[in-house]
Amino acid sequence: MKKIIIFVFLIGNCVLCQQIFSQETTSYQNKLETLKLEKEKVITSEKEALKKEVIAINKKLEQGEISVLEADKLKNDAAQLHALNIDDRLAIIENSISLLKRNNENQLAETNEYTKVSIEIGSKDGFLKIDDNRSRNQKDIKTYSNLVVAFGLNNSIIEGQNLNDSPYKVGGSRFFEIGWAWDTRMFENTNAVRFKYGVSLQYNGLKIKDNMYFVEDGNQTVLEEFPDDLNKSKFRMTNLVFPIHFEFGPSNKIEKENSFRYSRNNKFKIGIGGYGGFNIGNLQKLKYKQDGDRIKEKSRKDFNTNNFVYGLSAYVGKDDVSLYIKYDLNPIFKDATIKQNNISIGVRFDM
């Protein structure tokens, strides 16, 4: 009777595990379908927003507030803005889908490894022999991923000048970075050194002083005085880069019955490395008055900038927040008679 009870208990346990696994699979499928529906909603909402803006622009055109040329420019700018919004929002959802799939695969692997039980009936040691590898496998995860967001002040180091003589405003020149990073433990039995790598989108902005703006003169890009009084003169470079850092810092090893993890909560860290990538766009914004009219002018050109960007970067901080500095080793403008290199200082969040 006792042997029958044990056997029934094991069968029931297997059925229960199967039900739990089925529920987890259903939950995963539901989340995946929800994210796919979100992609369709993003496209629909951005198209609706663009449609409303176009209607508003047409209304201004009908009322004589703007010219046909200005209306066409506003429509084009709105279309580009919402196209970029769609790309960025879809990229976030795609990252969420990839994260969900990866975590589901890890969970399946962990489930198979953690619950593997071998049962022999009628063995020489008795009616049942159970070989449960849960007591022998200590699950370890060496690689983690996280969202990276950084922002702060931006400027350039110009050959033969110091920052006090810079033609760019310190407070108005800023940078923003957003990306995804992975970090992998370098050694088997310690988490003191991590290899961190990923992909980031960097926006480096320069706010130009003294009524100056950038002009292309053949293969040279130079600052010239604008013929009217500028209210705003700003130049922005957009780079797609692939950062690599070696991260150093202590961790607490947390051991459980069948697993262990390394926790870096409230721990000091320092990262040293660099990045390489591509310049994918440049934009110059000018705001000024001409014959009493307010004019906003945007120029998307090559501006003779270097297509390939690379540099050094470092951060030091605690937990998720760090002080962050990056410096482009490549000059901003190729073939420039006076070289200038972009530099950024700010805060970084590894969330």
Image (tube, rainbow, N blue to C red):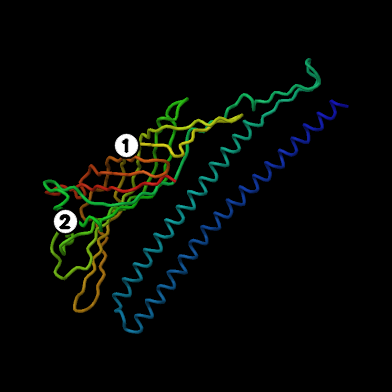
Q: Residue furthest front?
A: 266
- Residue 330 x, y percent position in the rendering: 22, 44
Is there a contact, CB below 8 Å, between mark 1 and mark 2? Answer: no
Specify the label residue 167 is tagged with. 2
- Residue 197 x, y percent position in the rendering: 39, 38
For the N terminus, give its image quadrant. top right
- Residue 65 x, y percent position in the rendering: 31, 81
Chain-order first, disc 1 or disc 2: 2
SS class of the residue under badge 2? loop
Residue at horizontal 73 percent and vertical 24 percent from the top:
130
Is 11 on the left or on the right of 149, as rendered? right
SS class of the residue under badge 1? strand
Q: Is residue 278 above or below residue 59?
A: above
The amino acid at mark 1 is: Gly
Given residues 175 and 309, the one toward you in this image is 175
Residue at horizontal 52 percent and vertical 49 percent from the top:
97
Q: Residue furthest top?
A: 124
Given residues 284 and 172, the one toward you in this image is 172
